[in-house]
Image (cartoon, coloured by chain):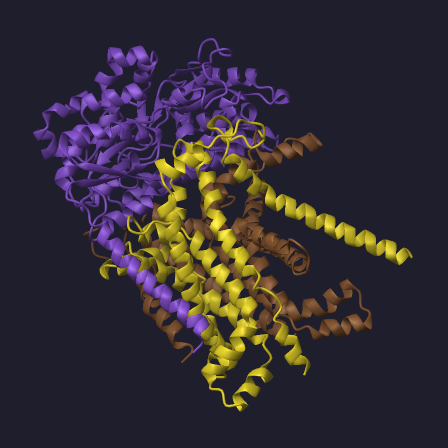
Chain colours: A yellow, B brown, C purple
Amino acid sequence: MSMDVKRIFISSLVYLVIALLLMSIMLPIVWIVVTSFKPESVAKIPSVWVFEPTLDNYRYIASIKPIWKPLADTLLVATSVAILSLAFGTPAAYALARYEFRGRDDLAFWILTFWMSPPVVFVIPLFLMFDRMGLLDTYIAIVLAHTLGNLPFVIWLMREYIRDVPREVEEAALIDGYSDAQVFARITLPLIKPGLVAVGILAFIFSWIEFLFALVLTTFNVRLLTVEVSSYWTIAGVILGPMTAAITISIIPATLFAFILQKHIVRGLTLGAVKGE
Amino acid sequence: MFLLPSLALLVGIGLAPFFYVLILSFHRYRLTWSDRPWEFVGLDNYRYVMNWERFWDAAWNTIVFAVGTTLLSFAVGFALALFLSQRFRGRGILRALVIIPLLIPPVSVGLMWRFILHPLLGLVPWIIKSVTGVTVSFFETPAMAMFSLILIDAWEWFPFMFLVLLAGLESLPREPYEAAYVDGANRYQIFRHITLPLMRPVIAVAVLLKFLISLKVYDIIYTVTTGGPGTATETLSYLIYRQTFAYFWVDRGSAMALVYEYLIILFAVLFVKYALVKARAG
Amino acid sequence: MNTKVVVPTVVAIIVIVAAVLLLTRGGEQAPTTIRLYMEDMVETAYLEKLLPEFEQQTGIKVVIEKASYEVMREKLISVFKSSEGYYDVIIVDNPWVAEFAEAGWLVPLDDFLAENPQLNVDDYLTSLWWTVGKYWKDGKVYMLPWYNYALALMYRTDLVNTPPRDWAEFYSLAKQLTDPQKDFYGVAAQARRGYKVVEEGLNYVYGFGGRVFDASLRPVINSSQAVEALFLYGRVVFETAPPGAINWEFDEAFQAAQSGKAAMMITYNWMIGALNNPEQSQTAGKWMVAPVPGGYAVLGAWGWAIPHNAPNKEAAFKFLAWVASPETEKKLALMGHAPVRKSTFLDPEVNQKYPYMKTLLEVVDNSLPIVPPVTVGEQIVHILGQYFSESLLHVKDFEEGKISEAEAKALIKQELDKAAQEIYELMKTEGYYEQQVQLPPPWGPG
């Protein structure tokens, strides 16, 4: 009996902590949404919750400084980056996880070193390179730059998820006459779907929030949200109302996207079954 | 064959800038010196960096910041991943909602938190004051400023940990759990003896990646404290950012970035050798 | 191969290529469009309201690209270095003029000014003209002043009878008004490291008779006057300003002031308009402006410039001739723009609308730039910012009783010595001490 009481007490304590955690995490987000409806005089006073709601901020981002083009561009770029990073990174991760060859771990590590230096110093040479190629202010330049920036982490994470797939499954398929590429595509990929989705979402997000390359590599033809939103930071203060409105609008498609995809982050049912055989 | 596309991209686009930076670090050159040739100075830039007290102070700040934010975001991310890997109604919505902080541009995150933490008008100090009656100033002392930055950064980045660990949890094999249930193990025992050991490799990679991300963060520092008060929150990436982009001393910036990179590689080698290999060996 | 990966990849690539082709086509501009790069500010909105007038006069269409001050330098570098050039007219901050001019990134405006005598450069206030206009090193003009941000004292008329005239008076008045129990403070200070702490702290240094450079461009920021000034500044920040002011920037301070939590504030002179604007301020109508205590104020200014790779220079000159003219400035000033011309400051119509215009003229007239136009202006500001911030931390130790006043001042002196040393070495690297240079008025002798 006392064991039960103790268990109930502990688990309710755990849920209380989780609930508090969720609340404190969501509070700033609620604040962003609330602020986007505030009139200017109280916009920057977060402790004010009672006010006359206004749509001025939304009018600002809809007509005075429209965010539609940046929003569409960012979605396009981030989606392309996510797909390209996975398309390039997953096969590489598979090779690094599955094949034994000399210097394999060194190669994996070398790939990660691309992720270890501060990006700041590489912006200028990359800028000069794209300038020479005439690719400045094009989708190609920014998508390539972001994909390059994502590859190391995509490879490393996917490699870890691929390792979790039991080898016997793949070997069985090889015996059945599948080629290497077929094994990878038909057997391994479906099994690592949770990882693919999670890493895909992350690659999407990393492109979504990247700022420095976006600032330097894009100007008129390509416009990205981070650069657009940063312009609300002025010498005479942050233009907070429109900024929070822009954030509110921009996180809606991204969150929807994440919501649809997260369903795929579920336990690969086959995995346990196969392993249990 | 599987590796080729990635390597082509990395070598094709990634390597040229790297050599540019490497060569630049042995020269004296400022971005504004448009018509002046690069002057070869050997190891001068490196000597300058190695003897620069602020560089090492910033290195220390960077470590404090990175360790703090990695641990905090890991704790929060893992707790939420465990919680949201259970099956219940509304799980999908919660899963989508908790990744929102990562979707907000970091520049905006920093700016917003300045208002949320405003000692007189901010949300958090207001709540603390209503509960305890104490006015808290989040950036008053160097230690407080660092703590606040870690808090803000962890708020932004815990979804990263959450996503990586959730996918890891979801791809764990089922049958050890079934066996444990049959044996009548309680939840804590299952967590301690099954989940944790199985998750160790993913946790190690997640922590490594988040640590590397934290080492590179400059936007939050730029928007919230600009490295102050004094040099209390000045991190290496912020220092390098200033040298390169604000002062245009790309030569020293390059040397600093490379020294910094070697330091990280050193750390990463040790981490991969010990933590990761050990985690994989189980 | 797996269709799940390949198909989306192919689709994505096709979409990207198509989009690039379409949008680069669309990006080609009609010959009569010019692009401006400037900060997103109220000033920009005023200008936008007047633009139709210019477009009608000349048939040139103007597109304004609004950016954040904080990222402008980074962006401008890519603008200057790109082979095509993006913008026809840009706004440049005063610490950057010399740097961009010496790099050859700006078009000299002397010929243009000779052709357009109606622009009458003698009408610009001297302090502004030497800050952003005439570059004393080669005697050429690279920028035309656009608006000033000289600092001034804002005070609540219901709490302060006569504005303080020196810093000691300012401190004791602020102290008297401070009541932490009621969440009310004397000064909404902005001591965040970087530009802010310099823009505020340097007023104290100027008021105590200190300077950053002497007439031959040697750093003298480690003078005893500067030490005294920063010590008093620290006392103001820690005794009379709200907690956390050491990390405050404009926003935090302005919100504290407008919501009725502070009696005074040192900020850009034209902010008086925002403080008295009911849409932005809960204490509107209670604020008045005065010159900063101690006489000399810190001056900053933006100016118009044309990048060396501007695609359409001819139209850019036309725009400059219109926007910098006294007529346009008067129209802008009537909307609330911060003037740069004497004639606008003294204009009866402007004065009728803004009765404090004469005070503002006094403020801008008696101001010294945050740094003179040297090629490392930005870096000097940040060196000062770092050591000013370190100095404040020593005053904090004094406030907490950890060290004595004499010890605190000795430590401040050490910080400022380091600042002076760093500035000296920087200036030397940039070749400033190879020949004898003399700072022109108003900051040098004369």
Q: Dividing the image into 4 quarters, which one contains the N terminus of chain B?
A: bottom left
Q: Position of residue B2 (x, y in %)?
A: 42, 78
Q: Quadrant of residue A193?
A: bottom right
Above or below for C196 versus C71: above
Res. A114 visible in picture? no
Is B178 placed above or below B152 here?
Answer: below
Residue C319 appears in which quarter of the rendering? top left
Determine if residue A247 is in view: yes
* In the depicted structure, whether residue C305 falls above or below residue B198: above
* Residue B26: x %, y % from top left: 31, 61
Give the camera-side residue of C144 and C438: C144
Residue toward you, C65 or C235? C65
Residue B31 position within the rendered picture, expressed as x and y whole percent measured from the top left: 27, 51
Front-lying residue, A275 or B82: A275
Q: Which quadrant, please, contains the C terminus of chain B?
A: bottom right
The image shows a total of numbered marks equal to 0
The residue at the point 26 percent across, 56 percent down is C22
Vertical relation: A187 (above or below) B59: below
C222 on left or right of B114: left
Residue C48 lies left or right of residue B127; in this view the side is left
Q: Residue at the right extreme?
A: A1
| Residue C138 position within the rendered picture, expressed as x and y whole percent measured from the top left | 16, 37
